[in-house]
């Protein structure tokens, strides 16, 4: 996926970019509206993440102009404003969704996924490993002509494995990625989801291997 | 505010009273002047006739055969009787000795050869009389003889005429007063009218209508309206400033928190040591805690601000809830939760959409936050006149057995929340919003199973 991040706070922008890069996406960063326009003129993006208060203008006005000029790329607004204080909702201005700062990356991912699913109308984001084809957007797993719909946590877990096939993912890191930080979850909770994925993968040449004391690994058999 | 407002009488009453007293004073002066003038006129005419009559008598006096002869001409009395049927008295003296007439008529002693007649008023035979006295010198055998004649007339006729005139004047005066009173009332009304229209047009305004007053008013009221408009302008500026301040404060607080949180989260993905990871997770939780508290405090400020000036419009509650549910599906999905919404076709209420949206979102946030993974939240909209009720059932912790009623107070949280981050303001906000709309918030535990049930009811329009 190719993202355009419009955010004037450099540290925050860097953290978001790092995050998206780690998840295997491509990100361009614009710190003002003029740069945004330049980027949009030369590159096609799958998603724009747009801050509202920017040094050279209001993101909402930009959004309004962008939609008026038939810009089709889905937009998620990153707002630090209180929702009750915004008289004109960003959704009315053509944003596909918005998220209030500070946000959980998993929520941002979930919102991106939902928006892209709604937007692309059948477009896919397929990855293959062995006989298994995984569509992170549609949330499906296919092998031997059988397609299984995944629940959210299964999908996110499989996405992590598919991003780094063959590498070991440690249990604590998987727990962090899968559960919110205010939930007290034991590392064993991950086993439930691994077990479910194993069930979905049954009959294919792809397996989730337990590496004792280290974690799990997606591998071919 | 009304308590401090003291009314010091009514302008209309004061104006009416002032105009009426003015009219009354004018009427009294008018009556007095007309009466005294007519009295003067009546006296004047009586005096003239008396004088003419006296002149005729004196002119008719002569010396005949060495004697003073006073032949009172008929005309002298007829002109007096013409005036009215008053009684006439006369007396003629010759050189100070009574000659003819009423001997006891009290007459003044005039100097000889006083050509000007002397008028006086007195009482004779129990009637008020007006009397004129004059002298004439006649020559008898080379010796001067002084003849003094007085003629008097009672004043009954004059009094009667005066009484008639007085009655006329009183009648006229009363008419004048009644006319003035009507004009005074109309004048007071037309003076107060623009004030009343201005007051009505200002009080009819919607609470959020802060446009300047443009009603046409009389010149004298222009400064008042200008001050009012300046005041409205200042209020508008100050309200906008507080709204901007709240939005700006949210921005200032949330942006750095977002930065720190994002950095902590990205660092968490990179470090492997357990104690570092635990510290980072603590940090993220603390950030979530403070950002939620700051956000809810600012939301609460904004909600209080908006409920104070509740701006109502027609809202389709069914669509509003659908939008909230749709938006929160992504968050619920993170916990593999299902949100189901049983809506009805139309659910019109009157209220502030942003506030109600915030209340509904707070309730749904709570339901998601306090419910376990892979649980189910069901949302129902039901109409039971006169209420429209939104109920949210979850399968979470439920409310504590005791003290649940305190949860709508600020910063109160249930004692069973465990480590779940919260500000203790969510239900306070909901409660304020619902009460501002004349509705009710009911919190209870799901009677047929685990979890909480929260209902908010709005009165149907």
Image (tube, rainbow, N blue to C red):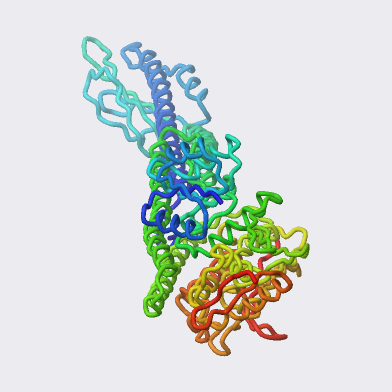
Q: Position of residue B265 (x, y in %)?
A: 43, 67
Query: Going by the picture, which residue comes out furthest to the bottom?
Result: B401
Instruction: Name which residue lies at 57% across and 47% down.
Output: A46
Query: Going by the picture, which residue comes out furthest to the front?
Result: A221
Q: Position of residue B429 (x, y in %)?
A: 52, 68
Instruction: Name which residue lies at 45% across and 16% down.
Output: B73
For this rendering, which residue is in front, A22 or B332?
A22
For this rendering, which residue is in front, B55 or B162?
B162
Instruction: Name which residue lies at 40% across and 71% down.
Output: B271
For this rendering, which residue is in front, B314 or A107?
A107
For this rendering, which residue is in front, B20 or B326?
B326
Which of the image's four quarters has the C terminus of chain A?
bottom right
Please indicate, yes or no, whether residue B167 appears anywhere in the rendered image: no
Please indicate, yes or no, whether residue B427 appears anywhere in the rendered image: yes
Vertical placement of residue B146 versus B353, above or below: above
Q: Quadrant for residue B258, please give it.
A: bottom left
Q: Position of residue A201 (x, y in %)?
A: 69, 71
Number of numbered discs: 0
Q: Position of residue B132 (x, y in %)?
A: 35, 26
Vertical placement of residue B36 versus A129, above or below: above
Instruction: Name which residue lies at 36% across and 33% down.
Output: B103
- Is residue B150 left or right of A24 when viewed as pictured? left
- Is residue A106 left or right of B319 when viewed as pictured? left
């Amino acid at each position: 996926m190719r993202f355009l991040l419009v955010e004037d706070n450099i540290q925050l922008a860097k953290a978001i970019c790092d995050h998206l890069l780690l998840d295997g996406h491509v990100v361009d960063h614009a710190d003002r509206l003029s740069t945004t326009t330049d980027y949009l003129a030369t590159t096609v993006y799958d998603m724009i993440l747009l801050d509202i208060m920017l040094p050279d203008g209001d993101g909402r006005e930009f959004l309004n102009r962008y939609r008026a000029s038939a810009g089709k790329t889905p937009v998620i607004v990153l707002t630090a404003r209180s929702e009750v204080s915004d008289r004109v909702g960003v959704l009315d201005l053509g944003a596909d969704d918005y998220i209030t700062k500070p946000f959980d990356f998993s929520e941002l991912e979930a919102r991106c996924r939902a928006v892209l699913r709604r937007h692309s109308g059948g477009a896919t984001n397929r990855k293959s490993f062995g006989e298994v084809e995984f569509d992170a957007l549609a949330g499906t797993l296919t092998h031997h002509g059988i397609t299984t719909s995944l629940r959210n946590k299964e999908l996110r877990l499989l996405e992590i494995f598919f991003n780094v096939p063959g590498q070991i993912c440690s249990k604590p890191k998987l727990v962090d990625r899968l559960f919110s930080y205010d939930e007290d979850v034991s590392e064993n909770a991950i086993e439930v989801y691994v077990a479910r994925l194993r069930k979905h993968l049954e009959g294919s040449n792809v397996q989730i291997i337990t590496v004792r004391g280290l974690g799990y690994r997606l591998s071919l058999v | 505010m009304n308590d401090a407002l003291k009314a010091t009488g009514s302008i209309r009453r004061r104006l009416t009273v002032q105009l009426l007293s003015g009219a009354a004073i004018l009427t009294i002066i008018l009556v007095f002047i007309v009466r005294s003038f007519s009295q003067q006129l009546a006296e004047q005419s009586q005096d003239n006739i008396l004088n003419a009559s006296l002149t005729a008598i004196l002119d008719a006096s002569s010396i005949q055969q060495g004697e003073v002869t006073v032949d009172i001409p008929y005309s002298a009395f007829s002109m007096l009787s013409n005036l009215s049927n008053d009684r006439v008295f006369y007396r003629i003296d010759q050189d100070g000795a009574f000659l003819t007439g009423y001997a006891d008529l009290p007459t003044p002693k005039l100097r000889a050869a006083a050509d000007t007649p002397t008028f006086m008023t007195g009482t004779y035979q129990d009637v008020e009389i007006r009397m004129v006295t004059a002298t004439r010198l006649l020559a008898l055998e080379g010796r001067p003889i002084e003849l003094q004649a007085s003629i008097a007339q009672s004043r009954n006729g004059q009094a009667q005429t005066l009484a008639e005139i007085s009655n006329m004047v009183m009648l006229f005066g009363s008419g004048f007063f009644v006319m003035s009173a009507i004009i005074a009332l109309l004048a007071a009304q037309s003076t107060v009218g623009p004030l009343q229209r201005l007051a009505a047009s200002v009080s009819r305004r919607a609470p959020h209508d802060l446009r300047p007053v443009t009603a046409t008013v009389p010149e004298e009221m222009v400064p008042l309206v200008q001050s009012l408009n300046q005041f409205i302008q200042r209020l508008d500026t100050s309200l906008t400033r507080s709204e901007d301040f709240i939005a700006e404060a949210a921005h200032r607080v949330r942006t750095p928190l977002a930065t720190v949180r994002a950095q902590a989260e990205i660092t968490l993905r990179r470090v492997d040591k357990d104690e570092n990871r635990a510290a980072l997770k603590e940090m993220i939780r603390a950030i979530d805690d403070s950002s939620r508290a700051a956000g809810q405090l600012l939301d609460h400020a904004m909600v209080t601000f908006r409920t104070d000036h509740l701006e109502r419009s027609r809202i389709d509650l069914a669509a509003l809830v659908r939008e909230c549910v749709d938006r929160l599906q992504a968050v619920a999905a993170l916990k593999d939760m299902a949100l189901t919404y049983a809506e009805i076709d139309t659910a019109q209420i009157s209220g502030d959409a942003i506030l109600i949206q915030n209340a509904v979102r707070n309730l749904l946030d709570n339901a998601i936050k306090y419910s376990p993974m892979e649980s189910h939240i069901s949302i129902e909209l039901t109409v039971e006149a006169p209420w429209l009720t939104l109920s949210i059932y979850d399968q979470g912790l439920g409310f504590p057995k005791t003290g649940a009623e305190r949860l709508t107070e600020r910063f109160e949280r249930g004692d069973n929340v465990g480590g779940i981050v919260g500000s203790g303001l969510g239900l306070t906000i909901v409660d304020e919003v619902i009460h501002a709309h004349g509705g009710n918030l009911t919190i209870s535990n799901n009677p047929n199973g685990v979890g909480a049930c929260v209902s908010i009811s709005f009165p149907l329009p």
